[in-house]
Each structure stands twice: as C-alpha cells, then as structure tokens.
Amino acid sequence: MFIKNAWYVAGWASEIGRELTQRWIAGEPVVLYRTEAGTVTALEDRCPHRRAALSKGNLVGDHVQCAYHGITFDCSGSCVSIPGQDRVPSAMKVKQFAVVEKWQWIWIWMGDAGQADESLLPQTFAHNDMDGWEVVGGTIEVKANYQLLVDNLLDLTHETYVHGKTIGNTAIVETPMDYEVKDDHVHVKRIMRNTTPPPLFQQICNFTGNIDRWQLIRFEAPGHVSIDARAYPMGEDSLENGLRWFSLNSLTPCDESSSIYYWTITRCFKQDDKALSELIREKITATFMEDVDVIEAQQKLIETDTRGVAEVSVRADGGAVAARRMVQRLI
Amino acid sequence: MFIKNAWYVAGWASEIGRELTQRWIAGEPVVLYRTEAGTVTALEDRCPHRRAALSKGNLVGDHVQCAYHGITFDCSGSCVSIPGQDRVPSAMKVKQFAVVEKWQWIWIWMGDAGQADESLLPQTFAHNDMDGWEVVGGTIEVKANYQLLVDNLLDLTHETYVHGKTIGNTAIVETPMDYEVKDDHVHVKRIMRNTTPPPLFQQICNFTGNIDRWQLIRFEAPGHVSIDARAYPMGEDSLENGLRWFSLNSLTPCDESSSIYYWTITRCFKQDDKALSELIREKITATFMEDVDVIEAQQKLIETDTRGVAEVSVRADGGAVAARRMVQRLI
Amino acid sequence: MFIKNAWYVAGWASEIGRELTQRWIAGEPVVLYRTEAGTVTALEDRCPHRRAALSKGNLVGDHVQCAYHGITFDCSGSCVSIPGQDRVPSAMKVKQFAVVEKWQWIWIWMGDAGQADESLLPQTFAHNDMDGWEVVGGTIEVKANYQLLVDNLLDLTHETYVHGKTIGNTAIVETPMDYEVKDDHVHVKRIMRNTTPPPLFQQICNFTGNIDRWQLIRFEAPGHVSIDARAYPMGEDSLENGLRWFSLNSLTPCDESSSIYYWTITRCFKQDDKALSELIREKITATFMEDVDVIEAQQKLIETDTRGVAEVSVRADGGAVAARRMVQRLI
C-alpha cells in the first residue's frame, strides 16, 4: 500500500520535544521524542507485550517506559527492562525508524533503517531553512488518501477553478504545461507570459500591468512536491519588483484514507515584512482548505464508486499520472 | 439492490433552483439544477476525470463546470469543454437522468432514460397539486432501509401501538384488513365502522359520537404509498362533517441503510384554515418521528442479527409481503 | 466468540424496574424488566416478526408488548397475542434468559437456561451484600474487548505504572506474584512485606511506617475478578489499624469491541464513614479511568495490527494467560 523505503515528514522539529508524541505514518503507529542530548528518536508505538501505546508512557532518561506494565526500551528499540524478571526475550523489541531532523522538519524512513539515505531527501526543501529566505507554514489533517493531494499539486490548472480568490485565474488553464520524468523526479513546468496577476499576487506586489508567471514543480516520491513560483512585471525577467517563493508541500499518509499535509511558503523577498508573512499564512491556509473541501468530497465519491469504470485522463494529468506510476513502481 | 427503471422522488420542486444540489438516490450521487429556462436537470454527480463532485462546481449558463479542473458538461451530460485541450475523449461524459417536475416534487428515473415513462408516475400523487386540495408536507432523513418504511405504511396496525397520541387507537387492530395485488400495485383496505375517533381526528372534527373510518392504501414500486383516509360520523357516508385526506408518502433510498421520507397530507375540507394546516403539519411530523424511532432501532437489530432465522410473518403483513415480492421481481 | 453457558452481570438490581431496559450482552440484545411481583425477567430484545426492539414497547402486566405491532410475549418468551389474528405460529417466540438477582446485581446466563446453575455464581461477590461490609461501586462503558480488562486485573504490576497517584507504587512490581489454576478458577497472589503504602492507602489509614500488603486475586470465567486486598502495619497481621477490602469486578462484553465494567469496593472497616465511602468512590473511579485510557488505546493498536506477529508474554502474565486459556477452552 505504501512505499516503505522512503522519507516521509513526521512533523515539525518544533513539535517534538521531551514528551512522547504519537503519529500514524504509512499505516504504522510511531512514537517520537528527543533524547536528553536533543536527538529525535522514532520507535514503533506498539508494545510487543500486549500492544499498549508506548506514547502513553514515560520517558525515563532516553528510554521509553511503557504506560502499562513498565517494559522499557532504549533508543534503538531494544528492551532494557521487564519489571518482575531478569530475562529479556529476544522478541521483546520494537522497530527503530531512521530519522533526520533537517530544514525545520523531522523526516522518517519507514522501511529498513539500514537503507535510509539522507542524500535522498528532496533537496529543494532546503529552502525551509536557508539564509535570506523567510518561511511560513502549517499542518492540515485531511480525510483523503495522500495521492489525491499529490495529484492536486501536480496539476495546477485546478487553481483557476478552486482558487479564484487567491492564486488562480484563467491564465493558468490557458497555458499548456510540460512535464518530464527523470530518474526519481517528475518535473512539471508552466510559464505564463503577459498575463494578469492573480488576486493574492496583485495584493502582495501591486503590479501596474501584466506579468510573466512561472510554476516549476518537482515531485519526489512518495509525497514531496516543491513549486518554484515566480511572478514579475512582463518582460523584466528580474525579481526586483516581483515575487518568488517556493511552495514546499509534503503529504504524509496516515492510513489509506487520511493524511497530513505539511506545507511552507518560503520567500526571498521582503523577508522582514511580518505583516506580509501573516497575510501569506492566512491566504494560503484558506487556499489549501478550498482544496481539502474538494478532495474530501472526491475521496467519498471514490470510496462509493462501484461501477468499475476507469478514470478518464486529460492532457494536464501528464505529470500526476507519471508520479502515480513512479509510486506504483516503487511499491 | 435497487430498482433502477423506476421513478423516485429527488426533492421538492421548491428546493431545486440555480444552485447545484447533491442528492444520493439508490446508491448514486446526483446533481440537480434548473436551466436558465427553468427546466430541472439531473446528472451523475461524479466527474469521469478524477471523481470530483460536480455539485461543488459552478453553473455556467446551463452547463455544469466541475469544481476541480473546470471540465464542463451540458444538460445531456456531454462534455463541452476540457480546459487546456481541444480533444474531448468520448468517455468524458456523465449520465443524464430523466426528470419530471410534477405535483410539487421532482421525480427522477434512475435507470435507462430512454425507458422513462411519465405515465408510470403514481397517479394518486396528483393530489399534491390539485384545485380544491390543501397540502402540507415535509422531508425526514431516516437511518434505515427504505423498505422498512414501506412495510410500515402498508401495515397500519402499528398505529395502534406507535401513534396512540394522534392517529392510532384500538379500532385499527380490531378490524381486519384486505389486500389485493394488481399488475403493478398493491391495495390494502381497512374499513372500520362504528368506532371511536383517534385523538387527532377528534381534535380536527369535534365528532359527537362514533365514526366510520376508511384507510385505502395503494403501493406502487419502488417506494410510493398513498393512503386515502376518511372519517365521518357513523352511517352518514358523507364528508360534510368529517375528514378526508390523502397521506402521500414516497420513500427514496439513499443507500442500503439510509433513506429520505417525503410526505404530504393533502385535504379537501377546510382548505383555507391555515391553523388547521399548521396543526396537521405539527402532529403528523411528530407521528412520523415516532415511526423513525422504532424503525431506526429495527434497522440496527437487523444489521446485528447473525442468527440466520427467518422473520415470522402475521396476517397483517399480507400487503407488505406482496409489495416486497413485487420489488424483488422488478429488481 | 463468547462463552454462552456462563453468568454475566446484566446490571445493578437498582437499575431494573417496571421500565423495559435494553442491554447488549455477549453480542445479543436483551430486554430486562421486573414483573408485578418484582421478579427480574430477561428476554431476547428482537421481535421474531420484523426485528423491532421489544424494549421500545410497553409492559402490560407481566407481558412485553412490542412497540411496533403489539405482538405480546409472556415472561417465558412465549407469544400470547398477535393483534388481528388468533393463531400464534410456533416460531413466534423469543428466548428467555435465566436470571438471578443477587448481591446487588442482576446475573444473566446467556446460553441454555436449563443449564443455568446458581451455584456457579462467583461466591466472593457475596461481599457486595453482606452484613458488616460497606459497598461503593460504579459502572463504566469501555470501548475495548472485555478480555483486555480481565488481563488488566490479573496482572496488577500495571498499578505501578498506571496508578501511581492512588493504589500503585514500586513495591508491587518488585514483588513476584504466584498463580495457580484450579478447576474453574485462576488464583493470583502477591504478598508484599515491609513496603511503603501507596498514596490512597496512606490517605485512608495514616500509617506511621511501612506496611504488609496482600493482593489475593480470583478469576472465574468469563469475566469475574475479585481481589481480596489487605494492608496493615508491618508485622501486625491484624486489621485493627489497617485496611481490608474486596475489589469486585465483573466485565460484561457487549460485543467484540465494547464492554461494561461493573465494579465495587466492599470493605469491613469504618463501615459507617460516609466521607470515606465518597473518597473511595472518587479515587477508584479515577483509577479505573486511567485503565480505560490505556486499554482503549490498546484496543485500537490491536485492531490496526496487520503484522501477524505474536504477543511476547512475560512472567507476570501467568495468571492472565491461564485465564485466557480457560475462556478459550470453555468456548
């Protein structure tokens, strides 16, 4: 069902501390915490004994003590103590997940920790933590399969119809997009020249005429989608009077029908303008909630569809279909 | 599971306008709207592209534009526009349902529109829109299979036990009922002579003595039940000092375990008495909610019944059993 | 799934009167009521006719009249009246369950009533209704399988980790427990000598030094667990200045994933101290809610566990594992 040997976002670095935190990721319960030295640790959140949730227990130094009978595990998932007995059965252990704390997020590798490779992290997400870039972001729980959210981000023609109040207008749908599949990425590109700015861009930049607008999208499996978005006065080819940001989105499946949507907008202009940051946070949150409304309804219509009829794809689906194929191949 | 080639009530004519409205009928999502000329249109509410809900989209003239990617369908369900491309694949279409607006309700034919035959509408429901008849009615969502509601209406002995505060008393159960199956109807008849009036009838007519009371029930598949109800001073055989109304009920299955109950009481006496209309609306709503309470509990007990034991029928079930057989035959 | 030929607690004697009361027990709906003479009666709560809930109906003398069509059953479950007809089909009957009212509770035998044997009631529960013993108790609905609650009570090492605010401390986990299986009982014993009193015991008894503490647990299938709990000043071997109570717990499965937890604490000291009774009620309720929190999370982790990996038992599970085997053998 899910790619296991891959990175998923498990949360914001700021969310994980000395309290045990449960997250469902790719169908598995995970308990996250920081050691006394500050290292983020992730273990299977299901005691091998009687399946109690370790996350309801206590942190004793760097060890997790089960809430129920006090069986204690170290950071590697090995059992270090069973109350009432000295012998520790070899089966008494929980899986340790490889974890990387980077670019403001906690990344988790749900498969074989030995294969976890930090170089496979989606490099564009470095913009979440880069000098000269200002970041706002959020977390949204969505009652839908994560692939519906990936589809959403790989075909931005929907902005015209769903997001007319903020980032959408007819320019998007009128401009064809190109896509390209490389080894482990899908690129989707749409460059709109001599077009009217969408409402949110106009509000931010006060353009006096038409603009050129770029959307350079990069998908990496299983659910990382970065969008290099640019808008500047037509023909200027400079960001002096325009806008450039990365919309960095990572979709983490909880289970087959629910997901967590981690997002940031990270920009390299007006970095010190806190009011602008607040405006972006508010407008982008509203924009994504429009998606959630459409996609949760879509999820229900997929679940109730008993007709056995194939989806009918259109040209704009090129990138999303390539991404789905890539995910299927990796599973 | 459901008869498809048949009429179901999709809603009140007054509910459907220039806004897209979703209804689940016989397991299928339907979007309803009026054209600019006022004609009610019903299409499958599931975009062939990615299964978004068309009903979350917009009406552009008489066309439905999908909320998600702007794919647009005309009143026949044919795709007239796919943003970003000229070619329209032949599979890009949604089903159009035959619809009739009549007698205050919207009637929908869920099967092959070519077979939809207006003459098959249940003719007694014409009393919903007939000179000299005054109508009150309502809509009730019920968490139960629609057939349990049909059963309910075809065996009115339950009025004695469930509706003692309004339309029930022991006269009903003491009087045998007859039933008769004709081509595509089931008739159930109960004539109670020289009997005490039930509380609601007494409140409406102020009878000074016993009454004769008639219940003439007509079932038409899949879920239309009309009851010609009469009550007048014993032996008078005239409605001068009595009551006559049609209780018109149509049960629309949403899915296997939920339904919508459309009902009216339409009367040919005291047509201008608005206080009486309000009294009837209030008392009949309360009466039907008593049924809903019993039937939703029944639904749960049916769903949890793992014994594999057959129901034990009684004589009063004659009409309801005949109706169930008719429905099974039509499926 | 459930042992049928066994006693379950169906409720408090004080809960059952002349109103029809529905309970789900071991997957079956049951209607309970008292006859005019005061005898508690339990019948299958599903009308053989159309599966209406008898418990929504009326008590007519000692007979239950179905809410829906008035079919009436006597205390033995035999049908005594079908409105509208004289003949009563032999299949028109509901199961009568054997019932005993004893020790403040209603006990129900879910299997063959002919095999119901009052001598099989768990005799320690007599303390719920014994001269010189003061009882407090309660009822808790739990969204978990009843066996998880039985497990909980048969391995009190969890008190150390879950109940540190009331009845738990490290003495428990540091002292080994013994268990013994007899015909139809499992006994678990833990005797802690020269140990510190847990917070609630200290609050009740104001011990001036260490104590000896006993836990004598007795399990009887399917879900009866009595705990003879004693605590007195170290070496005194007298209850003069100490505490002795029975914690009597009966777990009734509603269905596979929900249960009702009936509990009492019945004590033979300070019987007239109402403030103490209130303190015990409050603290033990809080203590059991700590269990419910852990166990409902455990239930979810069991339901979502698709790994097919066996539980890893520890020495302290001896009693609980013996109890599970006893239940499996009886099923």
Image (tube, coloured by chain):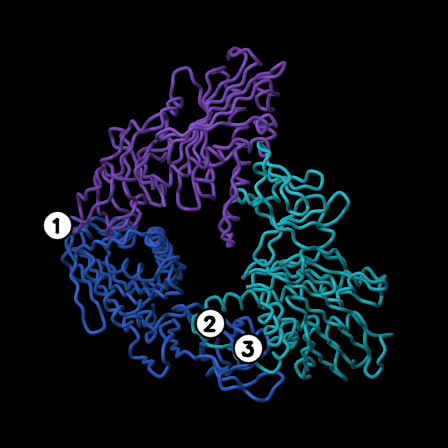
Chain colours: A cyan, B blue, C purple
Residue hosting label 3:
B59
Q: Chain of mark 3?
A: B
Pick whichever, A79 or C9, lies toward us.
Answer: A79
Instruction: Name the residue beneath numbered marker 2.
Output: B16
In-image side of A123 versus C19 (left or right): right
- Which amino acid, mark 2? Ile
Q: In the image, what residue type sits under mark 3?
A: Leu
At 33% from the left and 44% from the top, the residue drawn is C29
In the current view of this chain or complex, which residue is farthest to the bottom?
B86
Quick check: C290 above or below A118? above
Q: Between marks 2 and 1, how big is the CA–CA gap?
A: 51 Å
Give the quadrant of residue A204.
bottom right
Of C159 and B91, nearer the camera is C159
Residue C13 visible, this orientation:
no
Q: Is residue C69 above or below residue B321?
A: above
Give the spatial CA distance, label 2 vs label 3. Answer: 13 Å
**Direction from residue B316 to residue B65 in the image, left or right:** right
Q: Nearer the viewer, residue C73 or B279?
A: C73
Q: Chain of mark 1?
A: C
Badge 1 crowding class, 10 Å Cα cut-off, few under 14, some 14 to 19, many 20 or more, is few
Which numbered tag is attached to residue C87?
A: 1
Question: In the displayed structure, would residue B300 be above or below residue B119?
Answer: above
Q: Secondary structure at mark 3?
A: strand
- In the image, taking residue C189 as reference, residue A240 lies left or right, namely right
Left or right of C6 in this view: A126: right
Q: Residues under labels 1 and 3: Cα distance?
A: 61 Å
- At 76% from the left and 84% from the top, the residue drawn is A193
Q: Amino acid at mark 1?
A: Arg
Disc 2 residue crowd, few under 14, some 14–19, many 20+, Cα 10 Å: many
Query: Residue A280 placed where, x, y %?
Result: 75, 64
